[in-house]
Amino acid sequence: MAKNCRGLFITGTDTGCGKTHVTVGIMEALKRCGVRVAGMKPVASGCEIIEGRPVNEDAVKIQTACSNRPDYDLVNPWALRDPISPNIAASREGVRIEPEPVVNAYRELARSSQAIIVEGIGGWRVPLSGSLQQRDLARLLNTPVILVVGLRLGCISHACLTAEVIAGDNIPLRGWIASHVDPEYDTATETLEYLDNALKVPMLGEFPYQQEGKGDRMDHGLDLNDLL
């Protein structure tokens, strides 16, 4: 693995909190600063069969944002058809998710990259198999974590619990990013103020609400000095 390649693991408070938009936004920001960046979505459930192979829409967005567009299999080693918990999706397909393909893909991407942004699936404790959880991938890749908080009702508890569990897993939490996912959530300001004190790690940026089909949110207020 390239010694000068640094990684980040993007996790979220839950499903649909804006992890892909944040991942792509970070990648685009790093590219504009001259950083050779690659991205990964190691496990994706919810794929369309294209030319006989499962392809995930979010993984394609990440692939497209890479400095040097890598093979899809490096970006998304485990692509599962059904949009359900990955351990169940894998069981339905008669496969078992193992970490080795993810680690090998990360190492291959690191050879030509200065940074790798890894997007997790769902929330922090999503099971990948009976003995493997998402947190295990972050530990194996030796990457600090950024928590994406989807701003909506219930997010304060989800954010605080997730940050507490990451700390309990002894994996560094670099900071958190606010993602506006509910345009009718009218207590966002108060929520940000509370979480800024409660999470005990820096807020690294804020991504506004994006309407479906209006393009990806970019990096809004990202502090790249604190990211890597």
Image (cartoon, grey):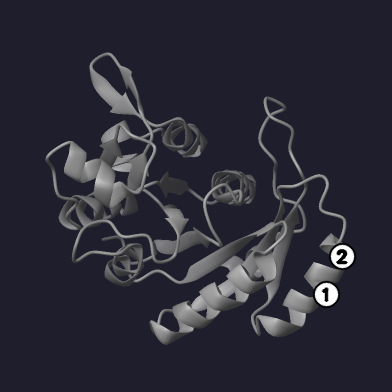
Circles 2 and 1: CB atoms closer than 8 Å = yes
Q: Considering the numbered disc 2 on the image, is that residue within a helix, a strand or a loop?
A: helix
Which of the 4 quarters of the picture holds residue 59? top left
Give the residue furthest to the top.
Answer: 51
Q: Residue at x 35, y 48 (%)?
A: 85
User: Is residue 81 shown above or below 86?
Assistant: above
Q: How dense is the environment of label 1, judged by Cα within 10 Å: few (below 14), some, or many (20 and up)?
A: few
Q: Residue at x 43, y 46 (%)?
A: 38
Residue 215 spot, x, y in % from top left = 68, 29
Q: Which mark is residue 77?
A: none
Residue 80 spot, x, y in % from top left = 28, 36
Q: Residue at x 29, y 27 (%)?
A: 54
Q: Is residue 132 left or right of residue 219?
A: left
Residue 227 spot, x, y in % from top left = 59, 66
Amino acid type at circle 1 is: Glu
Q: Considering the numbered disc 1 on the image, is that residue within a helix, a strand or a loop?
A: helix
Q: Is residue 86 left or right of residue 178?
A: left
User: Is residue 128 shown above or below 172?
Assistant: above
> On the rendered image, what quadrant is the N terminus found in?
bottom left
Which of the 4 quarters of the picture holds residue 144? bottom left
Residue labelled with disc 1: 193
Q: Nearer the viewer, residue 135 or 158?
A: 158
Amino acid type at circle 2 is: Thr
Q: Is residue 36 visible?
A: yes
Q: Is residue 228 visible?
A: no
Q: Residue at x 20, y 58 (%)?
A: 99
Residue labelled with disc 2: 189
Q: Is residue 192 left or right of residue 47?
A: right
